[in-house]
Amino acid sequence: MSKVLVLIAAIVLLSPLWFTAVGSFQDLDGVMSMPPAPWPRVPTLENYEWIMTHPIALWARNTGVLVVLTVMISVTVSCCAAYAFAFFDFKFKKALWLLLLAGVMVPRISLIIPLFVVLRKVGLGGTLIGVVLARAVVPMALYLARAFFETVPRSLLDAARIDGAGDFTILARVVAPISKPIITCLALFSAMSAQGDYIWQNLQLQRPEVVPLLIGLIRAVNDRQGGQAELMMNPIGRKLAMAMVLLLPMLAIYFTASRYFTSALGGAIKE
């Protein structure tokens, strides 16, 4: 009985993804048909061909730069800070930790204007590095990393210190290898947020040479400069194809790292 319930739940949860994939291979009549077809009745690649008429390579490169830099900086900052909170005792530690946790309850949308002004003042407005630095510190990532680090036996750290290792060496060669699950989890979350941060990227990245994939595709699918002929095309199918293009890299990353991802969640919840 439990397997049947799990199967039903899986079908319900995955059905939107399935119909998105099906709709991306249909023309406007197929997308608008009721009830929705479980498979393309007249398969077409027109939606994907339309996507390829745009500078996808440039947008993908910019997205890759955003994702890689965001993951590197976010994971590094989170791990270093979590190591300090997990294994160091210093003045105002509890107060600073509560202050950082309070950042989890602050809606990110409320920080857009202050971040925008600060980046303009320091000359990083409208740049990829400015977008990356605005996402470098994530309180929730710090919380998860600290919870996992505290499960590392102190005896390993003491043994490393006896051998003459410093804190950075201990973090890199002792704590980090043990904490691959949580590091993979943080990297996955950082990559997803870097690719899907539409409001912040749309506000910052206006120049064509720095437009990432998400912003470029959304602007292209909403472009009405083609006149009435463009309006008669298949905007819904194009949006579904756009969603699949954006989703496939994240699915590939997740399934590649799913073993570490589930282990990280289990470790964090346990603590």
Image (tube, grey):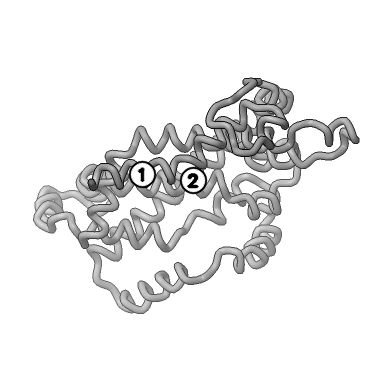
Label 1: few (<14), some or many (≥20) within 10 Å?
few
Which numbered circle lies on residue 229?
none
Residue 255, picture quadrant: top left
Q: Tell me whether circle 1 and circle 2 mark residues in contact (CB < 8 Å).
A: no
Q: Residue at x 35, y 47 (%)?
A: 185
> In the displayed structure, does residue 55 sit left or right of residue 23?
right
Write down the residue under mark 1: 8
Residue 223, picture quadrant: top right
> In the displayed structure, does residue 233 sit left or right of residue 238?
right
Q: Residue at x 28, y 46 (%)?
A: 262
Q: CA distance from mark 1 to mark 2?
A: 27 Å
Compared with 20, 125 (above or below) is: below
Q: Which amino acid type is shown beneath numbered disc 2?
A: Met
Depth check: give the residue in front, 36 or 225.
36
Q: Residue furthest front?
A: 35
Which numbered circle lies on residue 192?
2
Compared with 209, 178 (above or below) is: below
Q: Residue at x 51, y 70 (%)?
A: 106
Residue 178: x and y in percent read 21, 45
Residue 231: x and y in percent read 83, 36
Q: Tell me if residue 233 can be seen.
A: yes
Residue 59: x and y in percent read 65, 33
Q: Secondary structure at mark 1?
A: helix
